[in-house]
């Protein structure tokens, strides 16, 4: 029989799927012997059953009763008891922490009777009524869905009439009155009195957690983070401990290392006489852990010991929530803490130096996504700029954009293509859509653990929080800072690393990590010029990236069309060119010659027109192959349909019509007319599926011949200079082996001829793109002729799905994401199930024929982390991506190896 409910003492951290992240880590802390209030976890499996059956399985109620009794026995108090009542917290906890899930309800079990018992038992009447009002408030908001403002305005009114500003200054009598009014709110809003039966409170809260899995906010977050919709959430039910039992009690959060720099040490906030989220909600000023040490050395020492033991155990930065009840420490949550991209690299190498993890594990702990964040440009330090305010740098990056104060205007501005800075006093989960739309987030309140900071770090978005000088007036849509007033739509620039906020536009420059990947360690260190933090970051990235290079099996090439691109790619570690598009060689001034090729009446005329293109093409290839000297460079023969190089049909038609209307004649008009007819003749309904690639090469044989000749001549020229050019000729859009046979025969003829005239042995490999399903399915035949394959996964995605990227991405992808047909664009991450299957088949069949067939991929997927892991698994030899992504691909290719080998346990 399935067990739906587990005591904390039964689980461990490896059971995140079943117990959720929070539950699994609570269980792990129990295993470690840390002081955790006893409790149990209702599994994600129970949630899944609830979601399919539409009700909580009856067996869950039975098991809850059993585990509840176990908890009661452990503590020696019972739920609803008139003398010593047990109180509980009910907490959601999915596998991945997720905004939008039901917030924790504390003090479950209090009612009109037990509140008195709690008062006399704790010897503190004020505390008991404070706890009761919190229960009704939280339960009302999260379980009964009552507008939270209804409760807080009552609380505010009482504070005002009592003449106090903080909630802690309300007396027991004030709070009794608050409770009475809260109960009225519940009755008014739901038509039922506040539930008085403790067990009913528990059951209602559990069901509400299950229900919250499908709130709009949770769904939005899951789509964004690509978390599966059918995981479900677990529920943790736990005995309460009290941070609001006076001045010797309190609640706090802390990190075992600085999550933004990686510095070893303790970072945390503590709030005396407080409960739950008070500490992060910014209701009162928090204290530091050093202050806690002053107030309560014993509890502090215990906390230090717990932090150390968690770091030793998890071998990573831990994020901790704790409560101190009358001098006694209780651990309420831990998890491996979120961190900035820079901190990820630094913490990983610091842990290696402390011999807590291996280099392989360090590689596991950073991602290509994080590396790409470090490559983002930053503000130019020497630029002229007006500093408006300084807050806390909570998530790095530089963002310049128009100010928006709410979701609607942020989304509208983003939709119209504007970069947006979302400005709030502080953020809450309601602000998620605006945060998604924004390029950067700026708040006036809150610290490194505030909602804005945590969520922005998770999204990899630049954020500045707690810029206290900003007076944010959301209603009036303006920010006041001293004499400055900033209105909606005005431009601000925020630096998520330094926390600086500038008025207007600020110039951005290369990041130090970008300088490192393009100019090397020494140059980057020199550039960092005494900035120790930056140096440490660069060194950390260098160590991890170097290790990735050592471990990876996949080679990394770049897509580069010109010598300049090729040099840039090579600087960043590219080991060749995987795709050189030759289309640009037919544009600009050379367009005229292409026109003449198209308009030629005879073969001789055409040959002559093509011959004119040859010298310039040789120069192009010389430039490219010089930049890639000694490394392979795959050159793709011309791919797009010819009309892309010719004037627009409508323009030509209009031009001719106008000339005819005016009665103009002469050679110029004749030429335009002939061009119009030629363009009309090659006009296509679906150019993407029309006369392009190898089809064009076969239809106008001189075109490919010209390119092949230019490549071979460039090789001869460079060899004469003592260089080592290594071009590879790639034929696009092949669907049948026969097509390739024809091109190959032609190419071999040309190469042989040039070999002969120059008395040189020229060996230029000839291969093809695999970008049509038919090519993948007949790869065994194509491999008879092709010496290498390169998967063109863009076209392969288009032809497999039967849609064209330009048409569909804006037309219906957003909708498809919404209904979950797609979780991410298949043009961003390879659709492993469909397109990936064709890749797998292509690799397998190709190597059946030619076991040593060299296979790569070109196209954007070559730089996408998840896709790279897939390409590693199916056995490709290399990926090719844009020069910017080369370092990311190197890192992920290394990660693909260590993750596959399953080294480490994190
Ligand atoms: P979140 O997922 O938002 O971190 P938690 O479930 O951790 O929510 O609960 C929020 C806060 O509620 C905790 O940090 C802690 O302060 C408080 N809390 C939760 N359970 C208990 C408990 N058993 N006793 C006292 N406080 C608790
Ligand atoms: Mg919370
Ligand atoms: Mg928590």
Image (cartoon, helix red, strand yellow):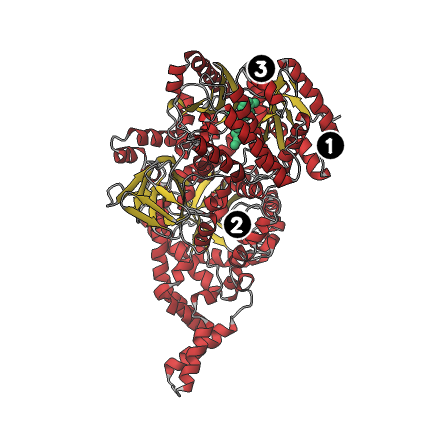
Residue 660 found in image quarter: bottom left
Q: CA distance from mark 2 to mark 3?
A: 63 Å
- Dot 3: element: helix
Which circle, 1 or 2, is nearer the viewer? 1
Where residue 327 appears, as percent x and y from the top left, is 47, 14
Q: CA distance from mark 3 to mark 1?
A: 36 Å
Please state which of residues 524 and 340 is positioned toward the viewer in this rendering: 340
The mark that comes first in sequence, 2 or 3, is: 3
The mark that comes first in sequence, 3 or 1, is: 1
Where residue 544 appears, as percent x and y from the top left, is 41, 30
Q: Does the rendering let one see residue 37?
A: no
The mark that comes first in sequence, 1 or 2, is: 1
Please state which of residues 353 and 762 is positioned toward the viewer in this rendering: 353
Residue where numbered disc 1 is placed: 57
- Dot 2: element: loop
* Crowdedness near tag 1: few (<14), some (14–19) or many (≥20) residues, C-alpha within 10 Å: some
Where residue 167 appears, as percent x and y from the top left, is 46, 28
Residue where numbered disc 3 is placed: 121
* Crowdedness near tag 3: few (<14), some (14–19) or many (≥20) residues, C-alpha within 10 Å: some
Which circle, 3 or 1, is nearer the viewer? 3
Q: Which residue is depicted at the point 47% across and 27% down?
A: 170
Please state which of residues 460 and 802 is positioned toward the viewer in this rendering: 460
Image quadrant occupied by the N terminus: top right
Which circle, 2 or 3, is nearer the viewer? 3
Residue where numbered disc 2 is placed: 827
- Dot 1: element: loop
- Toward the bottom, the furthest residue is 663
- Left or right: 29, with 665 as reference point: right
């Amino acid at each position: 029989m399935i067990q739906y409910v587990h005591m904390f003492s039964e689980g461990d951290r490896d059971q995140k799927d079943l117990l959720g992240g929070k539950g699994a880590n609570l269980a792990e802390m129990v295993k470690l012997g840390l002081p955790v209030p006893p409790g149990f976890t209702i599994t994600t499996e129970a949630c899944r059953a609830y979601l399919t059956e539409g009700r909580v399985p009856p067996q869950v109620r039975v098991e809850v009763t059993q585990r509840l009794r176990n908890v009661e026995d452990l503590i020696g108090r019972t739920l609803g008891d008139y003398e010593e009542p047990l109180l509980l917290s009910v907490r959601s906890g999915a596998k991945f922490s997720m905004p939008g899930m039901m917030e924790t309800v504390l003090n479950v079990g209090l009612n009109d009777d037990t509140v008195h018992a709690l008062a006399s038992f704790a010897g503190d009447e004020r505390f008991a009524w404070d706890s009761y009002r919190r229960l009704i408030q939280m339960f009302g908001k999260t379980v009964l869905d009552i507008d939270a403002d209804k409760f807080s305005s009552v609380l505010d009114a009482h504070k005002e009439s009592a003449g106090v500003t903080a909630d802690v200054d309300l007396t027991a009598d004030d709070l009794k009155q608050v409770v009475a009014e809260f109960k009225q709110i519940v009755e008014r809003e739901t038509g039922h009195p506040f539930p008085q039966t403790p067990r009913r409170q528990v059951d209602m809260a559990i069901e509400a957690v299950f229900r919250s899995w499908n709130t709009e906010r949770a769904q939005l977050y899951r789509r964004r983070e690509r978390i599966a919709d059918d995981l479900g959430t677990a529920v943790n039910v736990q005995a309460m401990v009290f941070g609001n039992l006076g001045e010797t009690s309190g609640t706090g959060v802390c990190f075992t290392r600085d999550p933004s720099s990686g510095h070893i040490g303790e970072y945390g906030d503590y709030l005396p006489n407080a409960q739950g989220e008070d500490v992060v909600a910014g209701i009162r000023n928090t204290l530091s852990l050093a202050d806690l040490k002053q107030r309560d050395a014993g509890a502090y020492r215990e906390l230090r010991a717990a932090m150390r033991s968690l770091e030793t155990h998890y071998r990573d930065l831990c994020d901790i929530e704790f409560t101190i009840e009358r001098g006694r420490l209780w651990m309420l949550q831990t998890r491996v803490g979120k961190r900035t991209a820079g901190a990820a690299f630094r913490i990983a190498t610091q842990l290696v130096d402390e011999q807590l993890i291996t280099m392989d594990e360090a590689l596991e702990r950073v991602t290509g996504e994080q590396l790409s964040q470090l490559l983002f440009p930053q503000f130019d330090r020497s630029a002229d700029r007006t500093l408006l305010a300084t807050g806390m740098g909570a998530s790095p990056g530089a963002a310049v954009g128009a100010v928006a104060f709410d979701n609607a205007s942020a989304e509208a501005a983003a939709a119209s293509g504007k970069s947006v800075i979302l400005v709030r006093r502080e953020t809450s989960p309601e602000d998620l859509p605006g945060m998604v739309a924004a390029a950067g987030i700026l708040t006036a309140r809150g610290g490194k653990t505030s909602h804005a900071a945590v969520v922005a770090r998770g999204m990899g978005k630049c954020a500045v929080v707690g810029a206290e000088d900003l007076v944010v007036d959301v209603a009036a849509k303006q920010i006041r800072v001293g004499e400055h007033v900033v209105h909606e739509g005005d431009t601000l620039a925020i630096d998520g690393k330094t926390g600086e906020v500038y008025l207007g536009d600020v110039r951005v420059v290369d990041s130090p990590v970008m300088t490192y990947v393009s100019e090397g360690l020494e140059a980057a260190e020199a550039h960092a010029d005494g900035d120790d933090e930056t140096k440490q970051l660069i060194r950390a990235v260098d160590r991890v990236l170097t290790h990735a290079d050592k471990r990876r099996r996949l080679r990394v090439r770049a897509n580069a069309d010109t010598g300049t691109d090729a040099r840039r790619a090579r600087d960043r570690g590219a080991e060749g060119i995987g795709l050189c598009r030759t289309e640009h060689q037919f544009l600009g001034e050379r367009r005229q010659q292409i026109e003449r090729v198209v308009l030629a009446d005879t073969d001789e005329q055409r040959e002559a027109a093509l011959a004119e293109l040859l010298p310039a093409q040789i120069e192009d290839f010389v430039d490219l192959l010089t930049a890639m000297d000694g490394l392979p460079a795959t050159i793709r023969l011309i791919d797009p349909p010819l009309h892309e190089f010719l004037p627009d049909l409508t323009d030509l038609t209009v031009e001719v019509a106008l000339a005819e209307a005016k009665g103009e004649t002469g050679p110029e008009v004749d030429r335009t007319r002939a061009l119009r007819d030629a363009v009309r003749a090659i006009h296509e309904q679906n150019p993407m599926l029309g006369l392009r690639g190898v089809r064009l090469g076969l239809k106008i044989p001189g075109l490919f011949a010209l390119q092949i000749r230019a490549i071979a001549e460039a090789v001869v020229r460079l060899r004469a200079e003592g260089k080592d050019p290594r071009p590879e000729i790639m034929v696009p859009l092949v669907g049948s082996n026969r097509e390739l046979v024809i091109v190959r025969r032609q190419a071999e003829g040309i190469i042989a001829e040039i070999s002969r005239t120059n008395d040189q042995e020229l060996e230029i490999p000839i291969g093809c793109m695999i970008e049509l399903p038919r090519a993948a399915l007949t790869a065994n035949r194509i491999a008879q002729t092709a010496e290498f394959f390169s998967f063109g996964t863009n076209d392969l995605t288009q032809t497999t799905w039967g849609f064209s990227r330009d048409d569909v991405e804006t037309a219906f992808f957003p909708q498809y994401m919404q209904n979950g047909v797609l979780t991410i664009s298949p043009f961003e991450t390879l659709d492993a199930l469909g397109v990936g299957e064709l890749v797998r088949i292509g690799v397998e069949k190709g190597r059946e024929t030619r076991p040593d067939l060299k296979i790569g991929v070109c196209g954007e997927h070559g730089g996408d982390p998840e896709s790279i892991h897939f390409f590693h698994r199916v056995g490709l030899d290399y990926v090719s991506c844009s020069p910017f992504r080369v370092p990311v691909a190197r890192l992920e290719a290394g990660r693909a190896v260590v993750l596959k080998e399953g080294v480490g346990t994190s």
